[in-house]
Image (tube, grey):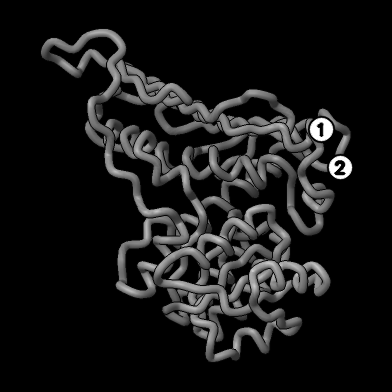
Amino acid sequence: MLNVAILSGWHVHAEGYAKKFQSMAGSRVSVVWDEEPERGKKFAANLGVPFEPDLGAVLKRDDVDCVCVNAPTSMHREVMVAAANAKKHIFTEKVLAITNEDANAIRKAVLDNGVKFVISFPHRGNPATLFAKEALAQKLLGTVTLMRVRNSHNGSGRGWLPPHFYVEETCGGGAMMDLGAHPMYLVSWLMGRPLEVSSVFTAVTGHALEDNAVSVFKYEGGAIAISETGFVSEYSPFMLELYGTEGSILINQEGVKINSTLLGGKLSGWVTPSELPKALPEPCEQFINAIADDAPIHYNIDEAVALTEIMVAAYKSSREGRAVKF
């Protein structure tokens, strides 16, 4: 049985992660730490575990094998480097860090200490997106010319996001930094390293940080990727589109469809795949399985650093009103 320390209830997903680790056969939550003690005490009480106000004391406990980091993004370097140096395995909510310097410092600590590391990239494990990855590997779309991925909700429009999600010092950004991480890591995974990025971020609801955002990436050979997100869209399902010189893939709430000149045989027009790849283990499961059984990690420290890199460039583009090169 692996003992997990929950490090902060700051992020809106903290409770979900804690309950997941509590429910898994191979793990349990043993303690909670929070940079805001009153919130931490309530969180710990709800989980039925002790609260410890001292992070150093948490990391010295014998009943802590690993940590789940939900702390403010601005604290990720402090918290994760300390955890790695204490030889505690690390699971973290996205993004890894606000700056490239912080991301690389975390990476160094993880590698130097040989700890397991998983970042929460759940869309990477979905059968539909795994199908898209396989289709690209098989060149079923020919040369890819455009990717568009959208992930948005109504958190600002309906007022259900916590006020601290609009504080730049701790969040590092608004909708794109948080919810937009999903389109961003999918763009990086499916399209590779871009040449440059151009961003337009706006605040529809008047908050200090953006709640409506688009970043456009340019690639060698002329391909374009569009990453869209926001906190102000009602009825906005997840969508992923891939277009190429020989075909296209559409992924939305209705499933997956592909149309390609290269499918051959009797297949023509838009086709729903008869079978999709098997889903990968959920990020929390991946983490526990990697520690217990040395199972594969699909969302590793290098991919976490890459996400920070494209976020930093995307925000610089928005601030400066120009394309930013990589």
Instruction: Tell me if mark 2 has few (under 14), some (14-19) or many (20+) residues whose alpha carbon lies within 10 angstroms of its own.
Output: some
User: Residue at (74%, 37%) from the top-left corner?
Assistant: 155
Q: Residue at x 69, y 60 (%)?
A: 73
Quadrant in which residue 38 is drawn: bottom right
In which quadrant of the rendered image does the C terminus lie? top right
Q: Quadrant of the N terminus?
A: bottom left
Residue tagged 2? 208
Amino acid on which disc 2 is placed: Ala
Q: Nearer the viewer, residue 76 or 158?
A: 158
Q: Secondary structure at mark 1?
A: loop
Q: Residue at x 47, y 82 (%)?
A: 113
Report the side of 306 relative to 7 (left or right): left
Amino acid type at image mark 1:
Ala
**Vertical relation: 31 (above or below) 169:** below
Distance in Å between CA atoms under marks 1 and 2: 7 Å
Residue 194 image offset from top left, x and y in percent: 49, 39
Residue at image coords 70%, 40%: 175
Residue at numbered disc 1? 203
Check the image and report above or below for 122 versus 154. below
Residue 195 seen in render:
yes
The answer to whether residue 199 shows anywhere in this view is: no
Nearer to the camera, 83 or 291: 291
x, y percent for residue 298: 37, 56
Q: Position of residue 62 (x, y in %)?
A: 53, 91
* Contact, mark 1 vs mark 2 (Cβ under 8 Å): yes
